Amino acid sequence: MFRHVPNALTGLRLVLAAVFFGMLSYFQSGSPTHHGDVLWLNIALIVYVVALFTDFLDGYLARRWKVEGAFGRVVDPFVDKVLVLGSFIFFAGKNFTIPWFNPAEIPQNVKTITGVTPWMVVVILARELLVTSLRGSSEGSGQNFGAQFSGKLKMGLQSFTILIILIYVNYWDQFPSRVEAGFGVFRDICIWVTLGITVLSGFLYVQRAIALYQAKNEKAP
C-alpha cells in the first residue's frame, strides 16, 4: 500500500500545478478589481507552498520506504519542470504588468512587478530543452546521464525564487516604500542568481555530454 503514496503525491502535485496556473490566469495586476483579484493570488501562494511540500515529501517517502520506481524517476522531474517553467512563463506575461509613468506622470509603457522578462524565460526554457535532448541522446546510446548536483541546485533555486516572487507580488503595494524597495532588490538578486546557476548548470551538462561522447569514441573499435 505504501509504495503508491509517493506516486500519488507526485500526481497530486500535477493537479496543484493546474490549480496554481488557474489562479495566476485569473489575476490581473492592472485591472480595476486588482484588490479583489489578490484573493486568487493569495490562494496561488498557498497552493504553491503545498506543491513544494509534496515535492519534498514524495522523494523522502520513496527513499525511506525504498519504493523508488520508473514512474517517479520520469514523472517527478516532469511535474517539477511543468511547475517551474509554467510559473516563469506566467510571471513574464501581461497579468503581472503595471503602467510605467515618466516624470510628467504620463503612462507611456508598462513594467512587470515580478522582475521576470520574456528573454529570461527563453534562457530557462532553452537550458531545459538542451539538457533533455542531451540526456535522451546519451541514455539512448546506453550511457548514464543522471542528474548532477548543479541541476538539483538549479531546481532548488528556481523553486525558491518563484516563492519570493509570489510573496512580493502578493504584498508589494502593502509594504512601506523602503520595505518594498528592499524586497524588490532581494527579488531581483534571486532572479539573477537563479539565471546564472541555470546557465552554469547547462554548461556543465554540455561538458559532461562531450566527455561521454569522447569516451564512447575512444572505446569504439
Image: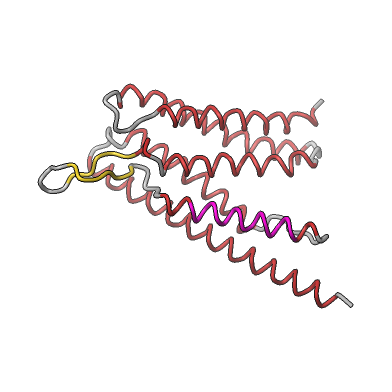
Query: At 60% from the left edge and 44% from the top edge, which residue is drawn?
Result: 81
Q: Position of residue 127 (x, y in %)?
A: 57, 57
Residue at the limit of the structure toward the right, as seen here: 221
Q: Is residue 11 left or right of residue 17?
A: right
Query: At 53% from the left edge and 61% from the top edge, which residue is drawn?
Result: 199
Q: Quadrant of the N terminus?
A: top right
Q: Nearer the viewer, residue 122 or 11?
A: 122
Magenta span covers which residues?
Answer: 122-137
Looking at the picture, does residue 127 appear above or below residue 109?
below
Query: At 67% from the left edge and 57% from the top edge, which residue is drawn?
Result: 133
Q: Is residue 197 left or right of residue 108?
A: right
Q: Quadrant of the C terminus?
A: bottom right
Q: Position of residue 187 (x, y in %)?
A: 38, 48
Q: Which of the 4 quarters of the picture holds residue 90? A: top left
- Reply yes or no: does residue 133 show up in magenta: yes
Q: Which of the 4 quarters of the picture holds residue 94? A: top left
- Reply yes or no: does residue 33 show up in magenta: no
Q: Which of the 4 quarters of the picture holds residue 63? A: top right
